[in-house]
Amino acid sequence: MAAEHLRDERVDHRFKGLPMDADGLTVGELAAQRRNLFTGGFTTPVLALSAERVEHNLAVLEAYSERHGLAFAPHGKTSMAPQLFDRQLAYGAWGITAAVPHQARVYRAFGIRRIFLANEVVDAAALRWVAAELAADPDFRFICYVDSVRGVELMDQALKGSARPVDVVVELGAGAGARTGARTEADCAAVADAVAATDTLRLVGVAGYEGEVPDATPGTVRAWLLRLTGLAVAFDKEGRFAPDLDEIVVSAGGSAWFDTVAEVFAELPALSRPVLKLLRSGAYVSHDDGQYRDLTPFNRIPDEGQLQPAFRLWAQVVSRPTAEQAFVNAGKRDAAYDLHLPEAQVVRSARDGSVRPATGITVTRLSDQHAWLDTSDGAELEVGDWVGMGLSHPCTSFDKWQLIPLVEADGTVTDYIRTFF
């Protein structure tokens, strides 16, 4: 419900791309005007999020999760947008995943009741905040990683005297040279024993991130996931999970291998208690025109559904110095570029508003506020035209924009998505 109050925020100079004559209006008032992205006073560069494609993607992952018996806690770091969190929850999400305590604070400010923090938290101030949130709200569920005995020691010190224990899952690392996580099953058992020796932490499951498997292939990812589920089976058999648990948590799943996660989790044998099989993919909400277009599991399992790229960055041609070159007014401050450069897709004519494919137009480089375009023979492009570009990597697309127009296919802006990075 707290996300509804975002409509009361005033539009002003903080929000790039929005109509200059909208200053002083609330976001809700501006949305009610249903302005057109191209004729309603928006300035370039402006990032647009497709209303229809977001809803499509939300429905696809809900159906996929239900079909495979998975609970779903999408990673909120992708968008940091409470309005999208609300939509994800409305489409059946169990909760929202965070990476760092700041993100969890944002989630709580907007009423998120279940948070899975996919990291070990050893900051005493952050842990005291978690403890206070748990004490104040008996319905709040919080789970985070542990991956070291020293981490458990620091957590225990910070949480002494807490009203409720903090639920933790042991993180199994994805292999030598991977990111975080205890590297071996023996290491995981030592961490579990350290948790059991405290009264401030409660071991509720095991987790990890298969996206960090080195040189990942379906076979190597599957092998690591079998280690993860095998760890859950061993811990349960050995009585390592807290005795008062209603369910055991087993969690994995980024945006590139959730099909393999679903397959291996389906093979998990019955444990002493029901298992919460928790998927955490986050990039699906907007998808993209690069990294996840290439890596999505739906390329391997097309019968299960398809995601649609929902972002388009619009920029205006501000210079056409030669027949082979042009520049638009969007650069590193506006577009994700950590994995791939933006992809020129369409051109909207400044003369008559017609839209045509961006044939022969390639983004070759980004400056801070310019994209460099190579234009081949026959490319139709002149100063004043708008170029619509697809983006790669949602996580570094959302974070450059504080207020993003949500746009219908005909250009009507129906809402504005507020981000908190």
Image: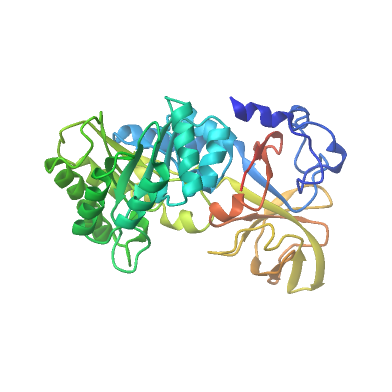
- Choose between 270 and 193: the one closer to the eye: 193
Left or right: 225, with 382 as reference point: left
Instruction: Determine the residue located farthest toward the right in the rendered image.
Output: 21
Q: Say which residue appears at 64% left-offset and 27% top-offset.
A: 4
Can I make out residue 308 in this image? no
Estimate the x, y position of residue 234 in percent, counting from the top left: 14, 47
The residue drawn where x is 29% and y is 34% is 69
Quadrant of the image for the N terminus? top right
Quarter occupied by residue 211: bottom left
- Estimate the x, y position of residue 226 in percent, counting from the top left: 20, 52
Tally the marks. Answer: 0
**Residue toward you, 186 or 130:** 130
Residue 148 is situated, as x and y percent measured from the top left of the image, at 31, 56
Which residue is nearer to you in this view: 29 or 325?
A: 29
65 displayed left or right of 315? left
Answer with the quarter of the image where residue 240 lies.
top left
Answer left or right for 251 relative to 412. Answer: left
- Viewer-nearest residue: 350 or 104: 104
Residue at point 50%, 36% (across, down): 56
- Compared to residue 237, the image places residue 219 above or below, namely below
**Residue occupying the far left of the picture:** 237
**Residue 383 visible in this rendered orientation of the protein:** yes
Up/down of 160 relative to 362, above or below: above
Q: Is residue 298 above or below residue 24?
A: below
What is the quadrant of residue 202 in the picture? top left
**Residue 122 on image: x %, y %:** 43, 52
Task: Residue at 84%, 52% (x, y): give it.
Answer: 351
Residue 379 drawn above or below residue 279: below
